Amino acid sequence: MEHANRIRESKNYSWIALATVSIGTFMSSLDGSIVNIALPTISSRLHIDIVNTEWIVLGYLLATTVFLPIFGKLADIIGRKLIYNLGFVIFSVGSLFCAFAGSFIWLVISRVVQAIGASMIVANGLAIITDAFPFKKRGVALGIMGTVVASGSSMGPPLGGFLVQHFGWSSIFLINVPIGVVGTVIAFINLRRDKKVADSKQFDFPGAALFVVSISALVLALMKGADFGWSSVKTIGLFLVFLLGFALFIVLQLRVKNPLIYLGLFKNRMFLVGNLSGFIAFASAISLTYLMPFYLERIYLLPPSFSGLVMLSIPISMSIMAPISGWICDWIGTRWPATLGLFLGALAIFLISFLQKDSSLIGIIARLTLAGAGMGIFMAPNNNSVMSSAPKSKLGVASGILSVVRNLGWIMGMAFIAVLISIRQPVYDAILGSDSPDTLLRIMAEIFRITSVTLFIASVISSLRGKHKHVG
């Protein structure tokens, strides 16, 4: 106990906290990317059809999205260390349940348990780091966190493929258990108790219920709209539930004394612009990670293993540039590094839109590297500007909102891709013939050019955040 107290009172505590939080960040990032590679095997072993298999991913994404601000708020009320440690425990238990799931329903339920734990970890990671580091050193810390996220995400597919091939699909979940146990013990020993939490101990249960219902309806509408049909009763009904539920949620948040999400945060231009530019950035960038494997394997005719190596150029360049950008923003502010990152991302995706069947491999890798570097340069200063514009008593809520915005950006981007493909594919099939690889190439070019424009718009929005004024 005395040793633990020395660690918490150490002059290097901020770096100890960063290393501790990085364990949870790495674990949740790894889990977010490791499962997809195992879906075909899971489908075969548990006798699940392809349509239902997506619920293994969707259930996790849905639960994570709706619980992020809830656990951010709870952490502000009862303490971030407690919620963070509890998240480790729940995530580990959920992983164990997943590994021994003998049916589809049990696996989806276990994934939701995992997601609850992950949301407790993710919603508090940025808050703990923001609180631990002084303003002038925060950029480097958040840049390192960006490197950890990119590393976990990039290791997921190759590690998942190795584990599934040699140890079976359950191993991709079992690997989380020892990491979770070690992370829980380290976090318990290393992290300080929060000195300041929310001004009130009251929790907004009606607001939480409305948020869960409305955002769940939105996520389901966007993810399943292509399957249901965008004009179907199911899809329209889900959108109506979202609109009505979210409108009621906003009214309630403006009226109650202690809301789930303090909307006054959005009056701060740094907070508003950071979240808006982040939403557009993630909605645009998902087109790259989703469509490029199809280009590399179906048009450029690379084997999947080689395609995966080429795609690694994105997270590798992100990992390198994120801490550098964080260090720079500690010196010159967050506005211009974040804006430059989005501009470089827009340029890279615009150049990618001109790729052909016979483009050089070096040229492809160079474009992907530039795209990853752009996102790496953007993330640390943007996260820094958002988190530093929130008061310490609302850091959990701010972190939760930032993570929800990221998830909704990914979902919105995926929905946009599905809509554009459903509209444009029949047109090109009529011109080029069905199953022509040129159809995919042309649709991808259109999507990439549109997303490059949206990223450029995001860079313009980012430039409007102004000079940062730290909120203590």
Image (cartoon, rainbow, N blue to C red):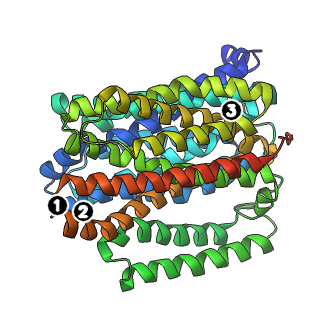
The reply to whether callout 1 and callout 2 are in contact (CB within 8 Å) is yes
Tell me the CA gap for discs 1 and 3: 42 Å
Q: Residues within 10 Å of mark 2 (few under 14, many from 20)?
A: few
Residue 333 relative to residue 298: left or right: right
Q: Are marks 2 and 3 in contact (CB under 8 Å)?
A: no
Residue at left 27%, top 60%? 105
* Foreground residue among 47 and 206: 47
Visible in this render: residue 416?
A: yes
Q: Which residue type does callout 3 highlight?
A: Ile
Instruction: Quarter of the image for the N terminus: give it.
Output: top right
**Would you call the spot at circle 1 few (<14 residues within 10 Å), some (14-19), or many (20 or more)?**
few
Rendered residue at 55%/56% (across/down): 67
Q: Rounded to the nearest whole Å, what is the CA distance between mark 2 and mark 3?
A: 38 Å
> What x and y, as percent, mark residue 337?
69, 34
Quarter of the figure that contains the C terminus? top right
Asked whether 451 or 179 is in front, the reply is 451
Which quadrant would residue 296 be assigned to in this image? Answer: top left
- Label 3 belongs to which residue? 129
Q: Left or right of 121: which side holds 254? A: right
Position above or below: 392 against 67: above
Of labels 1 and 3, earlier in sequence is: 1
Mark 1 vs mark 2, CA separation in Å: 6 Å
Residue 52, disc = 2
* Residue designated by label 1: 49
Residue 180 visible (yes or no): no
- Few, some or many C-alpha atoms within 10 Å of disc 3 (few <14, some 14-19, many ≥20)? many
**Tag 2, which secondary structure?**
helix
- Which x, y percent locates residue 465? 77, 48
Q: Earlier in the sequence, mark 2 or mark 3?
A: 2
